[in-house]
Image (tube, grey):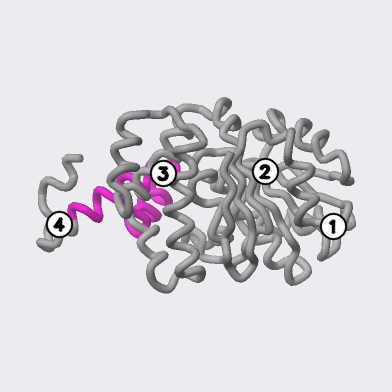
Amino acid sequence: MYRFKMPLSTPYDIVVCEKINTYINDEIKRVYKNKKIYIITDVRVGTLYLNMIEESLKDFEVKSIQIEGYESSKSLETYAYLCEKLIELGATRDELLIALGGGVIGDLVGFVSATLYRGMPFVQIPTSLLAQVDSSIGGKTGVDFLNHKNILGAFKQPILVLIDPLFLNTLPVRELKNGYAEMIKHALIYSADLFFMLKKNGLKVNEDIIYENLKIKAQHVIGDEFDKGKRMKLNFGHTFGHIIELQNNCLHGEAVIDGMLCAINYSISLGLTTADTKDY
């Protein structure tokens, strides 16, 4: 088990531990004193894990909303739908939202949390590899608009992030590779040791690998919460990658891998990077 703090504008803990059902109730009680919780998840994740999470939150009154978990769901239409459903369910500004799912759910719920009633607390429970090692921490939230990715959004920190590697057991191989791309990015910008660890382990991901990635992400976020300087290194591959993702309807990590190769090739053409860099 790993636990570490994010000392940001809203400080919070990140917990990496298997068997979330055994600790989720007590962890949320540490940071949230009211009774009502609203879980927002996607249909696939909901089918697999929603009942388990609801039953584990034994000291709370829990309601849930399910949507489709595709990139196309990161829209103003889905945002409006979630706000409408929460209002219909009687949610108030001091009640808790939980984002249970991958990066799409995390981004959407975070944006709702930042804007509905001018701000509601939320907890991230990421279920995809990409979300566990990258998008669930750091506070970037938002939706796509006018064929621009994440162009509408806000910085909104969660009050807690709970990461269970066992969620990855039901993840399709393509989604594992999707998250692997962000881990490769972290290794390339900061850690040769992590790079060779990833080469050795392949698609086998455990608490240790997740923690090593989170340390890199956390170091960049803590030093630059609002993405003005050091944190921009985490965007490696994303300038080209976002264009590739939108034009080719591929997964985010797949586009980022291609985006990193584009950036490396461009850097080689400018004489800033040696030609053998891309051979790794």
Spatial CA distance of label 4 from label 1 is 52 Å
The segment highlighted magenta reads 237-265
Left or right position of 70 against 221: right
Question: Residue at left 73%, top 34%?
Answer: 21
The disc label shown at residue 273, or none: 4
User: What secondary structure characterizes most of the magenta part?
Assistant: helix
Q: Is residue 274 positioned above or below 225 on the image?
A: above
Along the line of sight, the residue nearer the viewer: 182 or 82: 182
| Nearest-to-viewer mark from 4 and 1 | 1
Q: Which residue is mark 1?
A: 33
| Residue kind at label 1, given as amino acid type | Lys
Along the line of sight, the residue nearer the viewer: 108 or 51: 51
Spatial CA distance of label 3 from label 4 is 23 Å
Q: Are marks 3 and 4 in contact (CB under 8 Å)?
A: no
The disc label shown at residue 100, or none: 2
Badge 2: few (under 14), some or many (20 or more) residues near its Cα, within 10 Å?
A: many
Along the line of sight, the residue nearer the viewer: 17 or 269: 17
The disc label shown at residue 225, or none: none
Spatial CA distance of label 1 from label 2 is 20 Å
Badge 3: few (under 14), some or many (20 or more) residues near its Cα, within 10 Å?
A: many
Percent across and percent down for residue 53 are 76, 36
Q: Quadrant of residue 158?
A: bottom right
Badge 1: few (under 14), some or many (20 or more) residues near its Cα, within 10 Å?
A: few
Left or right position of 230 against 16: left
Quick one: label 3 or label 1, which is nearer the N terminus?
1
Percent across and percent down for residue 146 are 51, 62
Quick one: label 4 or label 2, which is nearer the N terminus?
2
Q: Secondary structure at mark 4?
A: loop
Question: Residue at left 31%, top 41%?
Answer: 195
Q: Quadrant of residue 253?
A: top left
| Nearest-to-viewer mark from 3 and 4 | 4
The disc label shown at residue 253, or none: 3
